Image (spheres, grey):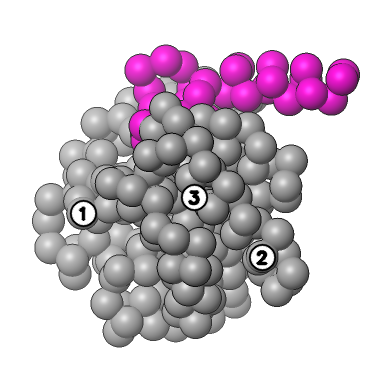
Amino acid sequence: MLCIPVTTRTSEEALIRIRECSPLADIIELRIDSMINADLSKLFTAKRAGVCGDTPFIITNRKRDEGGSFKCSERQRIDLLLKAVELGAEYVDIELSTGDALIEELLKTIRNHDNQTRLIVSSHDFSKTPSEARLKARFNECIEAGAGIVKIAAYARSVEDNLKVLSLIPYGRRKDKKVIAFCMGKLGRISRVVAPLLGSYLSFASFERGYESAPGQMTVREMKEISRILSEG
């Protein structure tokens, strides 16, 4: 599946982008950390009205130390994710580095809403790719934290770094766990192509050039063209 991130400055701009992305995306990630006073009620009202068809939402409120833009308190950051669950988000993303009590609060809210929201527990390293052993340990920590889906992203300093991160996909599948794993940066682009072939739960692609949410991200049209070429081959 292809996920297109929406990283607009306002909720009104997000609605426009959602309409543009929906025909191309399997999932839309709303990066509410990039928005000024994100209006989740407005976004979900539009969703229920059919603005994005049946395209599911991932609600992400990314921490600044993991590449995000949210500037208020940690309490306020989590409160927005709790509200997303209450409004019926199909997915919410929470960083492994978040406090245990806050993750548990999010899990409790998900359970109280009939587990209709799937929890993605994520970990991002924008400086390097850790060892394969450390990556697997991080994967297991995400599972222990309550992840329904594990997301691990690391910055590739060498082409070989891609192999370390991609190894998490068969590792997770052997444990019967859903995983999203890829490398960021120019040298990590190949992992974004290979990850879906190995069974990554989804891949991220920008709507157009200039709308990337992470370094090395390709456009959705590029990803679809690569997929077409490989399937024809």
Q: Note whether 156 is above or below 101 in the view shown.
A: above
Name the quarter where the C terminus is drawn: top right
The single residue placed furthest to the left in the displayed view is: 72
Which numbered disc covers residue 65?
1
- Sequence-first disc among 1 and 3: 3
Q: Note whether 174 is above or below 87 in the view shown.
A: below
Using the numbered discs, state the Cα–Cα distance from disc 1 to disc 3 in whole angstroms.
Answer: 20 Å
- Magenta span includes 147: no
Which numbered disc covers residue 171?
2
Q: Is residue 214 left or right of residue 193?
A: left
Residue 11 visible within the image = yes
Q: Note whether 229 is above or below 119 in the view shown.
A: above
Using the numbered discs, state the Cα–Cα distance from disc 3 to disc 2 in whole angstroms.
Answer: 24 Å
Q: Residue at x 25, y 39 (%)?
A: 35
Q: Bounds of the magenta span?
A: 204-233
Q: Secondary structure at mark 2?
A: helix
| Number of numbered discs | 3
